[in-house]
Image (spheres, grey):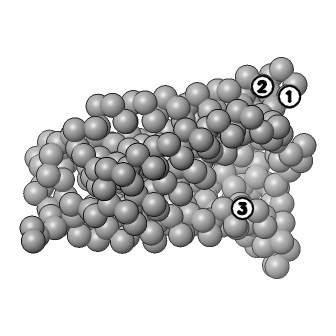
Amino acid sequence: MRLRFWILGVSSIFVLLLAAIFPPTAQPVAYHQFADQKSFLDIPNFLNVVSNLAIFFSGMVGLLFVLRCYQSPMQHSFIQKAECWPYLVIFLSVVMTGFGSAFYHWVPDNASLLWDRLPIAVGVTALLAAVLVERVSARMVLLVLPCLVVLGVASVLYWYWTEQRGAGNLNYYIVVQFYSLLLIVLLSAFFPSNYTRGGDMYKVIGLYAIAKVAETFDREIYDLGQVVSGHTTKHLLAAVAIFLIVRMLQKRTLMPKT
C-alpha cells in the first residue's frame, strides 16, 4: 500500500514537470463560439445558460446533505467529521460553478471564463482530496485538502495571467482537470474504501468523461436536430454525475471489518 502511494506521488511530480517542460497549450481561438447561440426571454445562449440550474440544484442537494451530516454525524455516511470537509468544498464549488458557468455563457469571454473554471478546478481537486482521505488516511485532510485546492486555483490563475500576456497556457489546468480524475480512478483501484459503494466513483468519472466527449462534439450533437447542443448536454450529464456522488454518500455504509 505504501509503495503504491509513493509511486502515485512520484508520478504526480513527474506529470507536473512535464506540464512545465512541454510547449504551452493555447486556448483555441474559436473556444467561445458555441453551436447553440439562440436567445430566449432576453437571455443570450439560453440553453447553455439555464442548463446550469441542474448543476446548481445537484450541488445544493449535496451541500445540504453534508451539512446535516456534519452537524449530526450519521455513522453510515462519515466515520469522522473531518471526512465531511472535502465534500463540503466539492458541493460548494458545484453551486458556485452553476453561477460561474451561467455568467460565462451569458457573456462568453476569457474574463467570465475565469469564474467558470475556478470553481471547477476547486471541485476536482477537492474530490481527489476526498478519495485520498477515505482510502489512505483521514489524518491527511488538513494537509491535502488546502494544498490540492490551492494547486487547482493556481492552475486557473496561471492560465488567465498568461492569457493577459497574450500567450495563454492551459498546461497546468489540463493536469488539474484530467490527471486528477485519473488519480481518483487509480486510488479507487489500488486502495480499498472504508465504505460500501466505493465502485460508484467509477460511474461518476465515467459519466463525466462522457460529458467531456459531448462538449467536444458540441456542433455535431447540435446539428442532429438543432434542439440541444453538446455543451448543454455536458452540463446536464455533469449534474447527474454530481447527483451520483450525493446518492453514494446517502446510501453507503461502513465497510464491515474482516
Q: Are marks 1 and 3 in contact (CB under 8 Å)?
A: no
Quarter of the image holding residue 106?
A: top right
Q: Which residue is mark 1?
A: 167
As drawn, the label of residue 215 is 3
Task: Identify which residue is drawn at 50% across, 64% down.
Answer: 205
Q: Is residue 203 left or right of residue 134?
A: right
Locate residue 77, reporting x and y percent. Answer: 19, 58
Determine the residue located farthest toward the right in the rendered image: 29
Q: Are marks 1 and 2 in contact (CB under 8 Å)?
A: yes
Between circles 1 and 3, the one closer to the viewer is: 1
Q: Nearer the viewer, residue 189 or 161?
A: 189
* Sequence-first disc among 3 and 2: 2
Q: Is residue 128 left or right of residue 67?
A: right
Q: Is residue 79 above or below residue 250?
A: above
Q: Is residue 52 left or right of residue 112?
A: left
As drawn, the label of residue 27 is none
Q: Are marks 3 and 2 in contact (CB under 8 Å)?
A: no
Q: Nearer the viewer, residue 38 or 175?
A: 175
Task: Identify which residue is drawn at 15% across, 64% down.
Answer: 254
Please tell me whether mark 1 sits on a helix, a strand or a loop.
loop
Please tell me whether mark 3 sits on a helix, a strand or a loop.
helix
Under mark 2, the amino acid is Thr
- How far apart marks 3 and 2 lie (CA) works out to 24 Å
Under mark 3, the amino acid is Glu
* Sequence-first disc among 1 and 2: 2
Q: Nearer the viewer, residue 55 or 198?
A: 198
Q: Which residue is mark 2?
A: 162
Screen quadrant of the C terminus: bottom left
* Sequence-first disc among 1 and 3: 1
